Amino acid sequence: MRADRRFGERFDTFYLVLVVLLTAPFGVDSSDVLAREAAGILGEKTAWAMPWYSVEGEEPGPVVFLTGGVHGNEPAGSYAAEQIRHWPIKAGRLIVVPRVNTLGLTAVTRWFPPLEEDKNQRDLNRNFPTIDRELPQSPVAVALWELVERQNPDFVIDLHEGFDFHISNPKSVGSSVIFTNSVRRASLAEKMLTAVNATVDDEERRFEMLSRSGAAKGSLVRACTDRLKIDSFILETTYKDQSVSLRARQHRLMVSTLLLELGLIDHDCADVVTAQGESAGVDVAIYDSAGASSKGIANLSRLLGRSDGISVVRIGPSDINVKVLKPFEVVLFPGGSGSKQGRAIGEEGREVVRDFVKRGNGVVGICAGAFLCSSHYDWSLRVINTAVFNKTIDIPGVGRKSMWYRGTAQNVQMELEGAALSILGKSGDVMVRYQNGPVISAGKATDLPMYTPLAWFRSEVSKYEPQKGTMINTPAIVVADFGKGRVLSVSPHPEATPGLESIIVNGVRWAAGHATLSED
Ligand SMILES: [Zn+2]
């Protein structure tokens, strides 16, 4: 049945020329009605149901089958696949199953949760047919294998992540391209490696080609290679010390390189990032890299992601460019370290954010993000005219101390007033979580308008004597216009205070220019 594979193993140096000149042989059989399915759900009405999507180009071309999230503790592949399924496919067909192990992704586990106790079946990526085993194991593998056979792709790409960089720790396959060697596959892998490694400065984090033993027996990629003779690859990033946005970018880079090479797309799509989920009113890009606390990112992604009409994507310094930010209306900088965020983005990135806001979009800074928004530091965004109480003071008997630090998280009194009701949907006195957010005063920038306070601290936190009295009755939440856009700077953490979460949800909608108020 597969004897007539259109590429077979006869790849030679003319391959690239052929891809360009002879697109017809790659065409999908137009009599194949199933091939025209635009989308579907595997295992519909089961707990593990997974959606799949198919995008067909106008021109004939190869069929590429892309999967992510087979291992639930490797989110970037799933994340990237969800973005890639929105790419503009010009030729051939792209089939994407972004969340193969839906339950595992939710539970953040490598295993398929219902079979967690079964050592032989819990790893979905060992459930597929092998040379000695004709049938896939477990319902998920059966359903996915059926889809692969039905769609009859020319290429299968499975996105994964390793726990460490293979180049420095051979125990992990992190940051590699894995396949069973052939001249054609090696040539394509080489191109993906070259593209991704051009963005990796650290020698210890470079991607490698792993083609000696191929993908593990029982894996999807090995099964497709051995049993269906499909050119198949596992693309592995590394989750150690790297943000989801960076890993998803690396996946996008490799897949974009491959799809460009195969003619499915006609330009590099690594910067084509779509908000997650279905199209929504407000698309928010959350900064998730250096200086952003992982707890804050997870919390904010969850909070905004489940709010009506808001969709969320994570971005890092490499994503802060005009192309990536274009579909978004708000960029959000979470808690962590403002200076680390500002320095990671760099002056060029800060200018991109300023321009993004000026053109009518919004920026929201929470805690560290509010330090970042200020016009106080050489690393700050300078989108709102706030100065920050941060003197370094010699305290007798204690030593030289920086005044921004006030100790561990505590609840403080905050009064919401004035426009807070219409912008944030709240007014009056509340207790809010505070963790070293900026203590704000009027800045000295002559080119920025004065901010409007929406809330004030009515009690304070201090660790050192000179801090006493400096925080009470200072603005806790301030807003301002910047060009045609809006800035919301929040010193405390309403998103991490039970009952006050809607302050951030409403603030984000306001910053986007879509003010519909949510209640808690
Ligand atoms: Zn994996």
Image: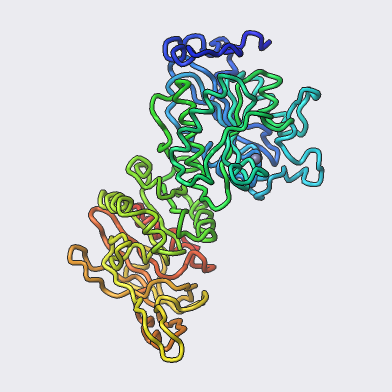
Give the tally of numbered discs.
Answer: 0
The residue drawn where x is 72% and y is 42% is 112
| Residue 136 appears in the figure | yes
In the image, residue 162 sits, relative to residue 151, either above or below, namely below
- Residue 238 versus residue 4: which sits nearer the camera? 238
- Residue 77 versus residue 168: which sits nearer the camera? 168
> Could you tell me residue 78's position as x and y percent?
57, 40
The residue drawn where x is 41% and y is 91% is 396
The residue drawn where x is 39% and y is 79% is 403
> Could you tell me residue 35's position as x and y percent?
57, 18
The colour style of the image is rainbow
User: Regarding ligand 1, which quadrant of the image does it lie in?
Assistant: top right
The residue drawn where x is 81% and y is 23% is 132
> Could you tell me residue 120's position as x and y percent?
81, 38
**Quarter of the image holding residue 180?**
top right
| Residue 103 appears in the figure | no
Is 146 left, or right, of 116 in this rendering?
Answer: left
- Residue 516 versus residue 265: which sits nearer the camera? 265
> Could you tell me residue 176's position as x and y percent?
58, 37
- Residue 28 versus residue 14: which sits nearer the camera? 14
Most extreme residue toward the bottom is 396
Is 416 left, or right, of 216 in this rendering?
Answer: left
Which quadrant, please, contains the N terminus? top right
